[in-house]
Image: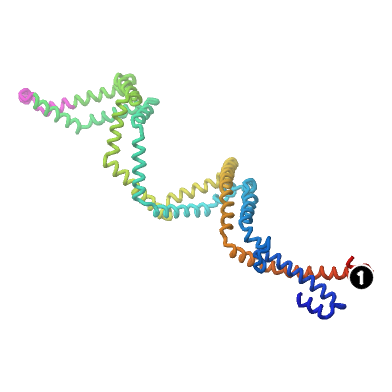
Amino acid sequence: MVAGFVLSHAMGQHGAWAWVAAFCEAATVGALADWFAVVALFRRPMGLPIPHTAIVPRGKDRLADGLAVFVRDHFLAPEALLDKLRVFDPASRLGQWLARPEQARMLAQMARGWMLQALDLLDEAAVRRAIQRFVVERLRQWNAAASAGEVLALLTTDGRHQKLLDEALQRLGRWLDDERVKARVSALIVRYARREWPKLMGTVEWVKPADEIGDSLADRLARAAIDELQQVLATPEHPLRRDYETWLQRYIERLREDPALAAHVEQLKQRAIEHPALQEYVQALWGQIHRSLRADLGDETSAIAAQLERSLQALGQSLGQDPALREALNQHMLGAAGKLTTRLRSSVTEHIAGTMKGWDERHLVEQLELGVGRDLQYIRFNGTLVGGLIGLALHAVSVWLAAQALPWPP
């Protein structure tokens, strides 16, 4: 445009050259003005400290804050996000996805792989110590006397303790009726009699062998005991049952209210906790659990994965058939999303602003120029063309005014 302007002036600006001069002169002004405006966005034109130039690097912090607020208000507004999530109906879509066997199987197998990796990452020694601390601490906090009282009170509900007594008496009767037991009782009677009354037993043996006498006594004692047991079993109001009932109720009350008995039970519990066998057992728990988990999870037909797959499919079917469950899950998701969005808004805003403020100014300008360079070049071309057209229009107006013999300029 400058060359055209110089050439048209050299040719005298007559006729067509006047129009060329008007176009080139205005186009040169338009091109230089747009060049200045575009360059002033990113740097100081020709390095001169002209006010209101290098707008992007000088206003980087302000632009960063503005962009962060724009993203926060238009992309992270809780109401807008929740409205879109509500229309999306995540519970229904999740139910449809989980109801397909292949999806549930894929998810279960992925979970199986994650659990195997988690087992490999665990520090077994630390886990053993943690389990031991947890179990021992819980045992130390456990009120054994109160728990025993509650268990015994539960056993007395609906006469269960009487059924327990019946079972014990029946087992005792079968034990007494065993010939081997009778033989041991007979031997015990004979041995005791010979030790306590040696002369008498020596005299008796002239009449009848002591072993036969012992067998007879043992058999009679067993029969008498069994008959008594049968009577107890057949009599709901037998004195033995009443004594048993009274003793059990008093013992339950003592477990609940007697500090001395509670302290004694606590001492027994502490001894059990401190016993080396219990400590070794607790420490070995993780090894057993770890081996069992690894053996199951390492198998393609893992029982844990199969159970998880069935559970996921059942959940998908339930979500498809139960509107109340879908609504409850949607509300839970919406509530969680709302809380998450509220927490993330400030952090995302600070992250965007902080990241942009940390950019190098020269690098930022270069990246923006590379990104919009072609458009900026066309802005210059358009400014040149528009300036030239405006110059032609102004020249046409001046020619028309001259033809009208009006003074120009006034």
Residue 303 visible in the snapshot: yes
Give the x, y percent position of residue 291.
35, 51
Tell me: residue 277, above or below residue 246: below
Q: What segment carries the magenta color?
A: 197-218
Q: In this view, does 214 lie to the left or right of 250?
A: left
Which residue occupies the foreground of this view, 339 or 4?
4
Pick the quarter of the image with the N terminus.
Answer: bottom right
In the rendered picture of this protein, how many numbered marks are placed on residues? 1
Q: What secondary structure characterizes most of the magenta part?
A: helix
Secondary structure under tag 1 reads helix
Pick the quarter of the image with the C terminus.
Answer: bottom right
Tell me: residue 113, above or below residue 204: below
Which residue occupies the foreground of this view, 240 or 108?
108
Quarter of the image for residue 266 reads top left
Label 1 CA crowd tier, 10 Å (few <14, some 14–19, many 20+)? few
Quarter of the image for residue 359 reads bottom right
Give the x, y percent position of residue 174.
26, 30
Give the x, y percent position of residue 308.
47, 48
Q: Is residue 236 inside the magenta stretch?
A: no
Which residue occupies the foreground of this view, 280 or 62?
62
Q: Is residue 203 inside the magenta stretch?
A: yes
Residue 322 visible in the snapshot: no
**Colour theme:** rainbow
Give the x, y percent position of residue 20.
82, 75
Q: Is residue 220 left or right of residue 102?
A: left
Which residue lies at the image location 31% right of the left edge and 22% below the top edge?
Answer: 247
Residue lying furthest right in this view? Answer: 405
> Pointer 1: what residue?
402
Tell me: residue 23, above or below residue 71: below
In the image, what residue type sits under mark 1? Answer: Ala
Q: In this view, does 182 lie to the left or right of 59?
A: left
Which residue occupies the foreground of this view, 3 or 223?
3
